[in-house]
Image (cartoon, rainbow, N blue to C red):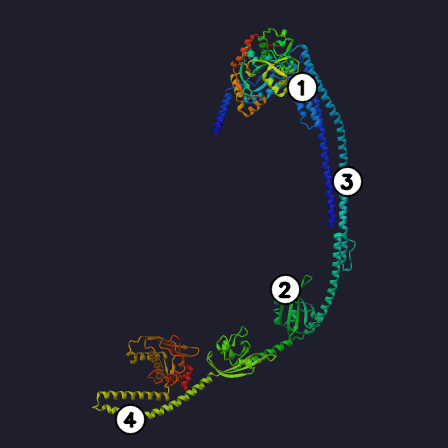
Amino acid sequence: MLRTRKMLISLSLFTMIITAFSVQGAGTEAIKQQASLTIGLIPEQNIFKQLERYEPLADYISKKIGIKIELTLLRRYGNIIDNFASAGMDGAFFGSFSYALAHARLGLEPVARPEDHNGRSTYYGLIFVRKDSGIKNINDMQNKSFVFVDKATTAGYLLPRAYFKKHEIENYSTFLKEAYFAGTHQDAIYDVLNRKADIGAAKNTMFYRLAAEDKRISDELVILERSPDVPENGLAVKKSLDASIKQQLKATLISMNTDPEGMEVLKKFGARRFIETSNDDYAAVYRYVQEIGLNLSTYDYINE
Amino acid sequence: MKKRIIIYLVGISLVFLAGGIYIVATIETATSTLDHLIKLHQVEILREHLLIQIKRVQADLNLWDTQHARSIDTIIQNMKQLDSVSTTCFDCHHAPIVTERLKGLTRDIEEFKDAFSRSLTMRANRARVAEETNKAFYISENLIAKVRLMVHMAGSKLSGKTQATLQDIARTKFLLYILIAITPFGAAGLGYLIIREITKPVATLLTATRKIKTGDLDFRMAGLKDEFGEVATSFNEMADSLKQNMLAIEESEKRYRVLFESAGDAIFLIKAEGEAAGDIVEANLAAAEMHGYTIDELLELNLIKDLDAPEDSLKGPGRIKQIINGEWIKAEINHIRKDGSLFPVEISAGLLEFMGQKYILAIDRDISARKQMENQILQSKLDWEDTFNTITDMITIHDKDFNIILANKAAADTLGLPVLGSGKVKCHQFYHGKDRPPDNCLSCDCFQTEAPVSFETYEPHLDKFLEVRAMPRFDHDMQVKGLIHVIRDITERKKADAALQRIEQMKLVGEWAAGLAHEIKNPLAGIKISVEVLLEDLNISPDDRSIVLRAVGEIKRIETLLKSLLNFAKPPKLELTLIDMNALLDQTLDFSLKHPSLSSSASIEINVSKDFDKNIPVMPADPVQLQQVFLNLLFNAIEAMPDGGELKIKSGYDQNADTIKIEISDTGKGIDQEIMNDIFKPFFTTKSKGSGLGLAITRRIVEDHGGAISVTSGPDKTTVFSILFNIKAGKKEALI
């Protein structure tokens, strides 16, 4: 039995390698023309740490597809829409909402997204306060300070917008004493923890990752609301990118978990594997945007 | 001395080793110190680099949101370089306190990165943004202050350390120069000490050996220590020993000189090799007197050429060669005196080597008197041996163990003795043919009685009658040590006596038989005539006739007997003629085989074989009488084989002895040993109708021809009659 399994795994690996090589062969011409690929990163966390997290992955892909991957970091989520063309980006790891915006504005196409060690490839947004803040519902939030992440994030902005809408607050800027954008999920969480803001919104994955390192987060913060599940931050590329390169990118990411070197990179990245992603996977985002009443083609994603 | 040199060498080695170790250690220490100093400078540079990098990132922060702001990628790159420089600090080994300080610095950098990132990404009101930016700035200021402090501390320490290190190196350099400068002088000094330690006693030893060489055996060394002291002691002992030996040699030389000069034998020392071989180098007084020269004259001569007799001089080179080959030779030769007379000398010579030259030491003894004595003794011995061997009686000299130790020629020839002295020759073996003395050995009585004994005896082993005289031999203590046999062979005398006796007996028997026959012959003739008359009577009955015929037959038998008696008593004279013995034998055999007594019993199977020697010469003999001899023997043989058997007739001739031997043998009944001696006696018969005169007449005829007849009968019943005719004796007989 064990032998049969080993044989099947070997066969699968062989098939994948053959596939990878055949794909590589087909795209030789395109690769010759494409000396490098510029991939943008959103400030999910401290931008320096964010770069450190993605650098091994970029090196791995470069090695596998034979095209240098150059990472470029964006100060803000929304900047990615503006700068995509000007910065000469070929693709970017988008948040779910920023992807939806990019898809709507630039026609980008999703390639793959990570799946965590528990098999989850989605996240959701959280609204949280300090336990000792006395804030338990919408009413308690009035005249309090609220820290968002960015206007182009699902967890860090759409969720609070949906939450306010649910409680019929049309203009949160007048309802709240202060609302500002921390820029990263990490800063949003720590601003509430460190009493720089009363209420915060951020993605659950970042919340629990930090909670695992800093016990105060789970001890001192309390969650008041959560959003629906949306796809985890994934890679999307411009529509004009050579199909073969796109295919190679997808094949490399999806087969990483079958390659010991890829496994090592995945471990540093904090994922079990990459799974194929299509625009349909973002249906939940589109639905959420619709519920809130946003128009993706006209939505002003620049932070106030 | 050896120990001292070893200690010096070990000392030098240790000094050099210590110096080497010191130099290596010093260089090592200086290198390590310099290496450490370089590392400290590197640290200082690194810290300054860190400070610059922090300032650069701080500048990025300060310029942010201005028109001079750097791109975010540049900012990130600068921050990465800051991280890299910071991480490099940890590559070095630090004291725990420094490590802790560096960890604090790293934490501060991380805090600065958080704050900087936050300033970059945050979108809030001006106050909040300013607050976060200020916070980041203060963190960077704090960082700069800390790093500046570290740079200052490192710099101040480094300055002191650099100064101290340079001083250390300068001092080390000085010491090394001193050490390198001193070492050759030190080594040279130690070398001088060692050489001085060795050469001084060696010079003393050299002086001492030169003294000894010049013959100063009383010189002694003093004042040397250690091994040289031991050598000096041994040297002094050697000098003592040399002196003692020299005295002993001088004494010995004196003794030998006296011995040489006063020796009774002539002593020569001559050259052994080359053209001068044999030249006399030294000679003593005895040599001069013996040869009639003075010593000085002898020293001008050559021993071999001038003193050896001419025939001995020729062998001189051979003797010298033997001596050179290592032999010590002894020889008797003749020497010539100055007056030309010869005299015998016994020379004893051997090789001597000294001063690289080979010499021959020859000792010559005048043996004129001894030779004369020896010749006399030898002549006496020869005379005695001649006498001893001339004696016809056998003389043997015995020891107590029955060994014959001496025998004269007569004894040796008769007894067939081997060469005496080569082994044990037991008397009983050669006299009696026995392994031990006979039980009734009369000679052996001498050993007990110690008195001479004489007797006559017949010795079967020798088939001789012997007249024996045995005399005991005594040693100096008058103890019997053996005996002397003087034995005379009296066989011939005994035979002559027996023959004479037999002749007398025959003569008596013949005369008696002739008288008796004569007396019987006449009445028997009357009886025979009377009986024959009776037979002519026609009226006699047939029964009576047969009785009368038997009486006539018996009368004829008596006549035959009487005829034999007369024949025996008065044998006819021999009618000699030259005969061929083989032809006579052949003829007689034919006659006997055709004789009616044998042909009547045709059933008897007798195989006859003849073995005649064709070389038998003719001999003078009476063929009629010899035929009677052969007929008697052949008839006896045939009669002895009533059941058949083998009859052999053999003839042979011994050229050396000039004898003819005839053998007639049968495989019949055989003859008992008891009657063997009686069968040739007259009137002895084993046959019922025999006269007992056949073999007696046969022997008489054979003996009349100068021959002899004998008989043997073995256990296999083979009986052989042997007749031996001596042709010369036969001729003699014929002449008689």
Q: Residues within 10 Å of mark 3 (few under 14, many from 20)?
A: few
- Contact flag, marks 1 and 2 (Cβ < 8 Å): no
As drawn, A18 above or below B516:
above
Residue B181 appears in the figure = yes
> x, y (%) of residue B115?
66, 16
Dot placed on the residue nearer the N-terminal end, 3 or 4:
3
Which amino acid, mark 3?
Ile
> x, y (%) of residue B190?
76, 45
Q: Residues within 10 Å of mark 4 (few under 14, many from 20)?
A: few
For the C terminus of chain B, the image quarter is bottom left
As drawn, A126 above or below B617:
above
Disc 3 to disc 4, C-alpha distance: 176 Å
Q: Which mark is residue B111?
A: 1
Q: Between residues B551 and A191, which one lies in front from this camera angle?
A: A191
Q: Which mark is residue B638?
A: none
Which amino acid, mark 2?
Ile
Q: Between residues A187 and B205, which one lies in front from this camera angle?
A: A187
The residue that mark 2 highlights is B324
Marked residue chain, label 1 = B
- Contact flag, marks 1 and 4 (Cβ < 8 Å): no
Q: Between residues A204 and B399, which one lies in front from this camera angle?
A: A204
Which amino acid, mark 1?
Glu
As drawn, B163 above or below A178:
below
Q: Residues within 10 Å of mark 1 (few under 14, many from 20)?
A: some
Marked residue chain, label 3 = B
> x, y (%) of residue B501?
43, 87
Which amino acid, mark 4?
Gly
Of tags 1 and 4, which is closer to the observer?
A: 1
Marked residue chain, label 4 = B
User: Dot 4 lies on which element?
Assistant: helix
